Every structure is written in structure tokens, then in C-alpha cells.
Image (spheres, helix red, strand yellow):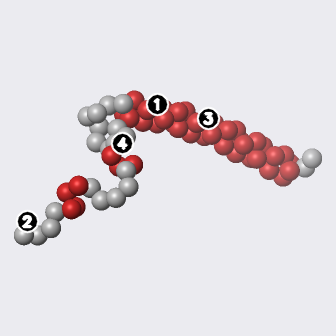
Amino acid sequence: MTEEHEQIHEQAEREADDLERRTEELGKHVEQTRQNWESKKSDVSVPGAVEDDEEETEGPPPEADITPGD
């Protein structure tokens, strides 16, 4: 290979190594975020994290049935 080809090859290898490292870091970040979310889902002090069974029912909430003048 010529010197130019060798430089291109080395640069491509460095970029591939960098992408591999960043992929591993992203995977770790995703896993930490998933674990954090799972712990928050069971914590009633975290607004919006605990699933609300009432939200799954169809129709308006009971307070929506109030008419003016009642």
C-alpha cells in the first residue's frame, strides 16, 4: 500500500475504534437509564412514574359530569 492508503486505513481504524467505544458508552447509559426508570416506577413520590389504573378506563372522569348551575 502507498503511504496515503496507509494513512486512510489508520484513520478508518481509529474512527471504528471510537465508534465502538461510543457504542459501549451509549449501551451503559441506556442500561442505567432503564434501571433508574424501573426504580422510579415503583416510587409513589415520583409524579407520573407510577401507573394509574384509572387512566386506562374509557370515558370522561366523574367530575366532567358536573353541569353549571347544579
Q: How many marks?
A: 4
| Tags 4 and 3 touching, CB below 8 Å | no
- Tell me what residue is drawn at x 46 percent, y 36 percent: 33
Asked whether residue 49 appears in the rendered view, the answer is no
Residue 14 in percent (x, y) is at: 71, 42
> Which quadrant of the view contains residue 58?
bottom left
- Tell me what residue is drawn at x 92 percent, y 47 percent: 1
Give the labeled residue for mark 4. 53
* Nearer mark to the viewer, of 1 and 4: 4
Give the labeled residue for mark 1. 35
Q: At label 2, which amino acid type do we have?
A: Asp
- Tell me what residue is drawn at x 63 percent, y 40 percent: 23
Local secondary structure at mark 3: helix
Foreground residue, 9 or 30? Answer: 30
The Cα–Cα distance between marks 1 and 2, rounded to whole angstroms, is 49 Å
Question: Quick one: label 3, few (<14), some, or many (20+) residues within 10 Å?
Answer: few
Residue 21 in percent (x, y) is at: 63, 36
Residue 5's tag is none
* Nearer mark to the viewer, of 1 and 2: 2
Asked whether residue 11 appears in the rendered view, the answer is yes
- Tell me what residue is drawn at x 76 percent, y 42 percent: 13
Q: At label 4, which amino acid type do we have?
A: Asp
